C-alpha cells in the first residue's frame, strides 16, 4: 500500500462523523464514570456503612495471609486478601453507569420515535392537502389516442 493511500484512508476514517461522535462519547463517558465513582464512594458507601454498623465496604475482605512487619533481616511482606468490598463498590459503579446509559438511550429512542411519528403525520397532512392528480376525461383520452394514430400514419 502506498503511503499517500494509507494516509488518505486514515484521514477519511478519522474524519467521519461516527468516529468523532464516538471519541466525544468516550471522553464524556470517562468523566461520567468519575461522577458515578464519587457518588458510590462519597454518598452510597457512607449510607451502607451506617446500615452495617460502621463497617465500610473498603474494609470488607477475606485475608489469605496476614502482613508481616519488616525486621532487620527481611522486608515487610504485604497482606494478601480478597477485597470483596471493593469489588462490590465496582459492581455498584457499573450498575449505576449502565442504568444511566439505559435511561439516556431510552429517552433518545422515545424522542426519535416521537419525531418520526410527527414527521409522518405532517407528510400525511401535506399529502391530504395536495389535490390528487385529475383523471383524464374520456375526450382527452380519445384525443391522445387519435394523436398517436395520426403520428403512426404520418410515419408510414
Image (spheres, rainbow, N blue to C red):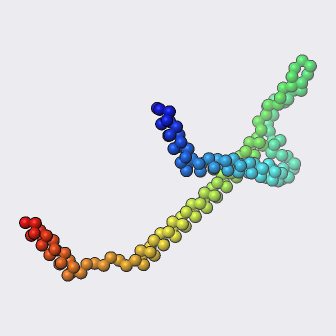
Q: Quadrant of residue 126?
A: bottom left
Q: Is residue 92 visible?
A: no
The furthest residue to the right:
72
At x 53% / y 42%, what residue is drawn? 11
Q: Quadrant of residue 63?
A: top right
At x 52% / y 70%, what residue is drawn? 118
Residue 85 vertical position relative to residue 97 in the rendered view, above or below? above
Q: Is residue 90 visible?
A: yes
The reply, left or right, for residue 65 in relation to residue 141 is right
The reply, left or right, for residue 154 in relation to residue 128 is left
Residue 151 vertical position relative to residue 108 in the rendered view, above or below? below
At x 57% / y 60%, what residue is drawn? 109
Q: How many numbered marks, from 0 up?
A: 0
Residue 65 vertical position relative to residue 129 in the rendered view, above or below? above
Residue 80 picture location, percent across and down: 79, 31
The reply, left or right, for residue 78 in relation to residue 94 is right
| Residue in the foreground of this view, choosing between 119 and 140 | 140
| Residue in the foreground of this view, choosing between 57 and 15 | 15
The furthest residue to the top:
73
Residue 82 picture location, percent across and down: 76, 36
Q: Which image quadrant: the C terminus?
A: bottom left
| Residue in the foreground of this view, choosing between 110 and 2 | 2
| Residue in the foreground of this view, choosing between 44 and 156 | 156
Residue 89 picture location, percent across and down: 75, 46
Residue 15 picture location, percent across and down: 55, 46
At x 64% / y 58%, what residue is drawn? 103
Amino acid at each position: 500500500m502506498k503511503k499517500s493511500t494509507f494516509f488518505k484512508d486514515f484521514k477519511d476514517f478519522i474524519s467521519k462523523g461516527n468516529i468523532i461522535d464516538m471519541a466525544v462519547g468516550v471522553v464524556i463517558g470517562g468523566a461520567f464514570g468519575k461522577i458515578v465513582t464519587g457518588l458510590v464512594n462519597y454518598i452510597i458507601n457512607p449510607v451502607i456503612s451506617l446500615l452495617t454498623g460502621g463497617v465500610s465496604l473498603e474494609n470488607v475482605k477475606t485475608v489469605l495471609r496476614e502482613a508481616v512487619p519488616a525486621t532487620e533481616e527481611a522486608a515487610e511482606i504485604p497482606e494478601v486478601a480478597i477485597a470483596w468490598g471493593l469489588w462490590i463498590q465496582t459492581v455498584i459503579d457499573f450498575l449505576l453507569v449502565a442504568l444511566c446509559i439505559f435511561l439516556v438511550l431510552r429517552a433518545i429512542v422515545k424522542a426519535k420515535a416521537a419525531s418520526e411519528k410527527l414527521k409522518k403525520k405532517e407528510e400525511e397532512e401535506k399529502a391530504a392537502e395536495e389535490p390528487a392528480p385529475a383523471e383524464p376525461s374520456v375526450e382527452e383520452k380519445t384525443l391522445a389516442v387519435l394523436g398517436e394514430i395520426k403520428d403512426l400514419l404520418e410515419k408510414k
